[in-house]
Structure formats: C-alpha cells, structure tokens
Amino acid sequence: MHTIVAISTALAPGGIGIVRLSGAESVNIVKKFFKSIDNQDLSEMKGYSAKLGKVFDGNEVVDQVIILFFRAPRSYTGENIVEISCHGGVYIAKKILSLALKNGAKLAEPGEFTKRAFLNGKIDLSKAESVANLISAHGEKANKLAISGLEGNINKKIKEIINFLTEIAANLSVWADYPEEDIPQFKENLLKKNLAEAKNKLLKISEKEKAIKALNEGLKISIVGRPNVGKSSLLNILTGYQRAIVSDIAGTTRDIVDGNTMIGEIPIKLFDTAGIRETSDSVEQIGVNMAKQNLHDTDIIFVLFDGSKKLTKEDIEVIKLVDKNKAIAIINKIDLGISIETEKIRKSFKKVVNISTIEELGIEKLKETVYDFVDMNSLNASEPFVTGQRQFEVVKRAISSIEETETAFNSGVTLDAVTVLVQNSIEILGEITGENVSEEIIDKIFSKFCVGK
Amino acid sequence: MDFTAENYDVVVIGAGHAGIEAALASARIGCKTAVVTMNLDAIGNCPCNPSIGGTAKGNLVREIDALGGEIGKTADECFLQSRMLNIGKGPAVHSLRVQIDRSEYSRIMKHKLEMQKNLDIKQAEIIEIKKNESVWSLKTRLNTIYLAKCVVISTGTYLDGKIHVGEVSYSSGPDGMFPSDMLAKSLKKLGVIMRSFKTGTPARVLKSSINFSVLEEQFGDKKIVPFSYSNQNSDVSLQNKASCYIAYTNEATKRVILENIHRSPMYSGRIDGIGPRYCPSIEDKMVRFSDKERHQLFVEPCGLDTEEMYLQGMSSSLPEEVQIQFYRTIKGLENVKIMRPAYAIEYSCIDPTQLSVTLEFKDFDGLFGAGQFNGSSGYEEAAAQGFVAGVNAAKKAKGEEPFILDRASSYIGTLIDDLVSKGTNEPYRMMTSRSEYRLILRQDNADERLMPMGRALGLINDAEWDKFLSRLERKEREIKRAQSTVISPSKALNKTIVPRGTSAIETGTKLAELLKRPQLNYKVLAPFDPDRTENDEDILEKVETEIKYKGYIEKQKRQIEEMRRLECQIIPEKINYRKIIGLRLEAIEKLEKIRPRSLGQASRISGVNPADISVLMVWIAKIRRLGE
C-alpha cells in the first residue's frame, strides 16, 4: 500500500503540531527532508524511539522537530509509522505535510489510518462497520458534490485536458500498433504542443489553490508593527467593533487579540499583536515574542507604519522580521500628512497601501489588496475549479508527470517509454474523472485513424 | 440408441488455435484428453491471414511459447518470411510477425495432436451438452456419448455460423465447412447467454493473375529471429522463402464501392452481429474515412505449394460481381482472378463476463471457454486462451489449484482480465495500448516472466529449461560487467559519441552509465569495450534495454507491486454484496454480475469506485478474522 500522510492535530494554532506517516516507505520519505542532530540514519532507529533534528526545505530550515518512530508491526496501523512533532500552528505542519507529499507520500483518506489499523488486525472487530461507514460517508459527500454540479464542471475541464493527452497517446499507440499502415507520420510537434497545452491548463487550475483554500479555510492575517502605529484601530475597523483596547500609550496590547470578519466571501481571522520593540517589561516581552512566533502561522501579514513620522529603528526591525512573500505594507495616518520614506517601503514590499484608521480612508483598497493576494479574481464564475485538497494533489502530480514526460522526450528516450509516461499522466487525472484510460485511447484510435486489415 | 464410448478427464470441442493449445496442454499435464472437431482436415486452419504474430500478438506468441504452448514452434516450422516490427521505436513495442504456409501449418498441428500421448482425436459434431450429476455428457450427431470431468469449448466462427456475401446469406462455417448449429441451441438450453459477433475476410486470388512488376515488394528481415525460444541459438536455420507486396486502392475503387454500398449486408441491415473496429471491411474504410485518397493493401502468399494470394486490408461482404469489379481497379490487379471470394461471417459467442479468470464458467462447474467463443479475435488471442483454459481444465480434473496469470505477468493475463472483468462489445484484439505494464511485458523477456511457470506446469523440457537458465546467467553476468567496467575517456571515443548528440566524457565512466544515454548502444561502444566476451546480440539487446530503461522499469515494478497487493486479496465465492454496509447500489449490481475473484479484479470493473473497494477490503478482513 502507498505510504500515507496527514496532519493529525487540529488545524488550529496550538502548542504542537503532529504530522503522521504510515506505510513501508515512511522512513525513506522522512529521510529526504529530515536530518537528525546526531546524524544517525533513520532506518536504523529502533521502534518506540525518538530523535531530535531539523526539517529542511532544500537548504532552508523549516523547524526543529522531534521524530517518533514506531516500527511495524508494533504501531497503531501495524505499519511503519513516523510522527513528526513540530512547533505549534498550522503553517509548519502544513509545510511538513507538503514536503512529505512532494517526496512520495499520498494524502490519507478520511479514516484511512483507522482502516489500515483494522486491516492489519490492530483494532477491534466492532470498529469494522464504523470504518466502512466512515469511508462510504466520504463517498456520499463526493456524490453530493457531484450532484451539485460543482464537480461535474471540473470533470468536464479535466476531461478536456485528458483529451490533449489521449490525442498524443492515441497517435503514439497507432504508430506502435499499426507500423505498416498507411498513416501519417507521428508528429513530434503535436506531442510538444499538447503536453504544453495540458500543462498550462493544469497550472491554471493549480494556481487557484490559494483562492480556494482561502474560501474553504479562511485566511489568517496578523497585524504587526512597532508600538502605536494603529494596529488595534485597524483590527477594530476591520471587525467593525471595539475588539481591542486602543490607547495612545505604546505597549497597550500585550497578548494576541484576535477578531473575525469577512472580506468578500473570505472568512478572515485577524490577529492584533503586541507592538514589536525592545522592552524591559517582561510581560510585554512575552507578548512581543508571541507576536514573532505568530508570524509563522499566518497567511498574510499586515505590516503597519505610521506615515506621519520618519521610519524608526523599530520599524526597520519589523521590516527585517517579516516574510516579504506574505506581507502587505500599510502606511497609516495619512490624514496627518506623509513624512515617512515611502520609497524605502516600496523597495521592501511588493504591496503597499495607504490608509487612515481615523478617517477610514483606504480600507476598501486594503481589502482589494487582500483579494488580489490570494488571486480571488482567478475564480471566474464561468471557469470551473477544483475544490478539494485531494484534487489539487492530483493536479500537481499530473503536472509533474507531464514534466517528466517532457524531460524524457527532450532527452531522446524512445517513444515507447514516452507513451507509458503520457498514459501515466492520463491515469493520474483519471483519479478525478474516473475514466478508463486504455478504452479512451482505443476509442480515439479508431475514430481518428483508418487502420486494420 | 445412445452409446457411451469413452470417459475422459477433459474434452475440447474444436481444434482451431484455441482448441489445439487446450488439448495439448491438458494431455501433457497428464489428463486423459480428447479433442473433437467437425473435420480433421480443418485442424489448425487459418481461415484469415496467412501470418502469425504482429504488434502485441507477437508478444502473446512468445508468452505461449515460454509457457510450453505450441503456436510459436509451429510458426517457425512453416516459416515463409518474418519481420520484427517497430525496430527503432523502443523495445517495448518490438513485435515479431511471421508469414506462414497455412496448409503446412494445419498439417503440422494435426500431426502433433496425433502424436501426443494421452490425447484422442475425434471427427464428430457435438450436438448436445449437458451435465449428469458431476459429469459432463457430450452427444455427437451419431448419438455417441463422451463423458468428461471438464469441457473446453473453442468453437471459433463455427457456432451458428452464417456467411454473408452481398444479398446472399446461408448457414456455414468458415472456408466452406459445416456450421455447428445444434450445439449453440444446446448451450442456450443449458443457460449460457449467447450473442452474435461478425468478422470478415478478403478474397484469395490467383498469383499468376497479378502484375507484380508494378507492386512494391516487401522482403523479410535479414536477421531472422525465431518465435520459439527452443529455436534460438539452435541448428534450426530459418530463411525467407517468399515476399509480400504492397498495393493501393484509388478513386475508381472508391467509386465502385460507394456506388454499390447499398448491396453490402452491413449497410442494408442484414447483419446484426457486431464487427471489430480494428478489422474494418474495405467498404467500412471508404465510408468512415471518405476523405482518405487511398488505402493500402498487402498481397501475401498463402504457402509455397499454392498459387493462392491473400489480399490483406481488403475484406468485404459486397456481392462477388462487385468484388471482381473493385479489386480490378487496383494497379497490378487489373486482371485479377478471384479463387475464394471475400465474405463476412456471423457467429455465436458468449459474453465473457460469464467466465472467471480461469476461463471456467462461473455458473457451470467444469465448463470452460476459449478463443472466438469468448468474444476475442485472432489466432494468437485464441491460442493464449486455449492454453490457459486447457491447463485449468486439467488442473480441475486433477483436483489441483487453478493456474492464473495476472495483468502484470503477461499480455495473456491482460487479455483474460480484460475479457472477464470488463467484457467486450466487439471481437477483442490485443494491442500494446491495452497493457499498462508494457515496458515490462516485452517480447524479449517473455521467457524470464513465464518460463518458470511453464516449467512448474511440467510443460518445459530439460533442454529448454537449461537453455533458459544459461541465457539468464549470461545476461546477469553481462549486466554485472557493464556496471563495473570503466570506459576511459579518449579522443576517439568522444569523436564517436559527440556527433550522436551526447556529451563528451572527461573521466573514466562506467559502461552502464554510457549505455543509459539514449544516443548510445553496445554497437557504437564496441571499439572502446575490449573486454566484452558476450557476443550474442539477443543477450546484449536485453542487457541494454534493462540498463537504459531501468528508471522506467522500476517505476512500473512499483506499480505492479501495488496492483498485486489488491490482486492477492481473494473475495470469498459465497459473498453477499447486498449485505455489505456502505456499498453503493451501482457497485453491488456490477459486482454481482462480474463476481470478481480478487479485490484487484473488482477495482477494474467500471462502476466500482475506490470507496467501494475500501469498504470491500474492510469487509473481507472482517470475514477473515471472524473465520479465524
């Protein structure tokens, strides 16, 4: 069976996150992105043992984690299980999940760990039916989605893409199965063109992942900045009520204050953090540290500046701290005139919005920027889109399979192997549409080519 | 008065390509076997093309040979010409095709049956089949009764056969033989669900009436590879003895056909049977691909001592007068004389989803089907099923475990799984695109995949087995050598390889690494590889394939492992799908119809989705544990 992976802790900020893998390959997969402190080979770990180390994404450290290893058959599922305990919050756990997926694990189905536990004789017979119910309930849900037409649309779209690939496969197959027939030469251009076309369309679908995820799971936005730039005021405006205490005393907010709101259809969870500064107040310092930690877990960071003043040392510190890829710079207090070095900010951030929390200026523009940030506009009502993470996984696997095909073709591998790769790509997409690949190809051959004795 | 003549373990009805393999396999396994045919002179008849093999079909022949079947050996024995197709397109699609002497083929096969220990040959028409308690009773037209523990039905196009030529149609088997009508009725009475398929064949024409000087001659390969492993590296030397020729239809051909299309029984609605898309008649080609200017045809020899020539690609059911007219529009055939007119034949066969993967009827214990009777088409497909049905009938008669080939083992396994799990709406032909594992199911390694199984069945003799082991050993040795031999960089080497589009080497490089490059091969590297001792081209080719495609082959092996995990989860025969909580109604209906043997087979049934398989998997585990 495939090695499966899932985040087994709740998808909410918390003390600790656990990513769990089960299956024969679990150790080998984890080895690809985990290095233990003592450099011991994970395969040599004993069952029921732990190891401290770091998770890497390429050369970049993602987190320091603890690995727990349960060797088959003495584990929950009866297979090799690796549990990765990482620092709290959703971001890191998701990152580790994606590393596991990238390295060959498959996303677990609902109830799949339990199902495997059952199949391997690890849990009680009485659970069998509840497992079956769990699985079929999942099927029901999929059915409902299908009936609602949401999936029907995407099926149509995926079928279009499959069509580009079956056209290649049919051409390659007819070329292999009817070598002596009077049929047109196999066109390498068709292969290149259709592969590129299929890939582009899939990329377009996968680009929407951000927006779909925002719609499904909402966005977490942290508001950071040095003390007294108006973070709490912004929170209050966006949530529409006095959620945070606002005063002009720097350091008023010490804990993380959160509030819920909607931007368009996107559910938003806002975090107002303590103003980041060096402080001698130990309680405030804890707040500052929490603010820094919180930045890892959020999807978007609002970096707030006081536009009426020059940049301070603390502002610079904040700029250094945040991940620019998910940051939006907000210049507040523009009602007081702009004295801040706007150019410097523009150099550091891709997106900059001017607002005034007092006059409530620029708030709409800010919301639009958030919208753009997750490419909400890519969700054109007339364009169908995939909705589940599983489907996104399928799309991504199909993209990499097509890329593998392109590489093989370009490096001069014979076309029999290329055909198999094309067919693999179709099979992957078939996981969404449920199509029978070889029948599709054969149908295409006989509708397009006049072959046969 | 009925007369009970004999008691057999296995009786095979029909002695075509399926029946021959079934009868030989059963007798060789040690069962008392009889093969019954309506006409002894039609044993191993080739009523269509005079050739064996071709794309994907060549792989089937190799596989049958590796298991201990006869088709490959006999094809070698009446060899006229051969071509390895698809050279240059990659090893997965290489395929051998042999032109054969068809009457010699038939004669040799008949003699092999006659010489076979444990095997009786009977000329008789079976008119009734029924079961008396645990024994099958077969009644001939002469009221003779044969009793058998197991029966293999391989009736080809004889069963309820009906020939159509233009406005004329009549009951008949192929090639002027009698049809078998009463057996079809008896099977229906038994409760077998029958249906009707059709196929067709082109005209046989007189050689001396063809002007070959204007046709393109097609020679056989210079390097001839035998079909049978037993003939590789042996004293048997095969030589091309005849050529094929290529001709083309033209505007005039098209005009004649389209003007007379209403006279075709296919178009006037007189044939209900479904014909194969991959074997279209010439009128089909003209109608469906009307923008195509010309269609190619092959003029093939039927044998050395006959002047009959076969017109491949020109099958038709138009009236004879129209046939003469359109054949004569073809350049080179202006004065052609038809000896046997083209015809379409309709016949009864079964929906193969009534069978299990052993080719035994799920509802009729001890009754097996093979070949066209099962809804397939082609000599090779028939032989493959005949072999498997024969082995399983014998195993059953002896009370032994069944013999099952899965999709990953062979094209044979793929063929059978497709037939019994998915069914077919037209005569089923094997094609490379039907196998998801085709980088592994190559014609060059059929022995490695299957000969150990053939040996275990007792169908591979010591000489063949030793030869196989030695090939295997030499291959392994050469792979090891390629992996350890270092080729030093040199001007001469780089001068050879760079123009082929691959980069120069600057440090010593393993031979295997160089062979991995798509642009290089053993031949090119020969001058730089002085330690090579292996000179057998077949072995070098195999090694090269395994090195070059290692990554892809391993990927397929992983997929196979995954597939086999489901394959070995056997579904209990007495399962009640309706009682399983969580199965969808559509899945229940499909599963009840197909009655899959394993979860793997269940997963390939259309209408059964992964969630259903999961539910089933849990249920099977539950039953297993309750039983413990």
Image (cartoon, grey):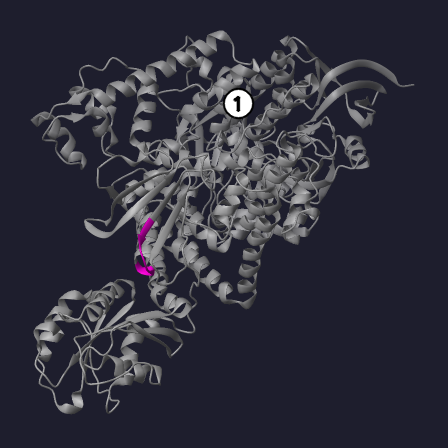
> Percent x, y for residue A133?
59, 53
Give the position of the N terminus of chain B as an image quadrant. top right
> Percent x, y for residue B67?
52, 20
> Was residue A86 drawn as part of the magenta stretch in this picture?
yes
- For the residue marked with disc 1, what is the amino acid? Ile
In this view of the protein, which residue sits in the foreground, A305 or B394? A305
> Percent x, y for residue A171?
40, 46
> Percent x, y for residue A237?
30, 85
Which residues are the magenta region?
Answer: A85-91
The answer to whether residue B267 is left or right of residue A8 is right
In this view of the protein, which residue sits in the foreground, B612 or A7? A7
Give the position of the C terminus of chain B as an image quadrant. top right
Can residue A357 be seen by looking at this rendering? yes
Residue at x-position 16% and y-position 65%? A321
The answer to whether residue A23 is left or right of residue B619 is left
Q: Few, some or many C-alpha atoms within 10 Å of disc 1 (few <14, some 14-19, many ≥20)?
A: many
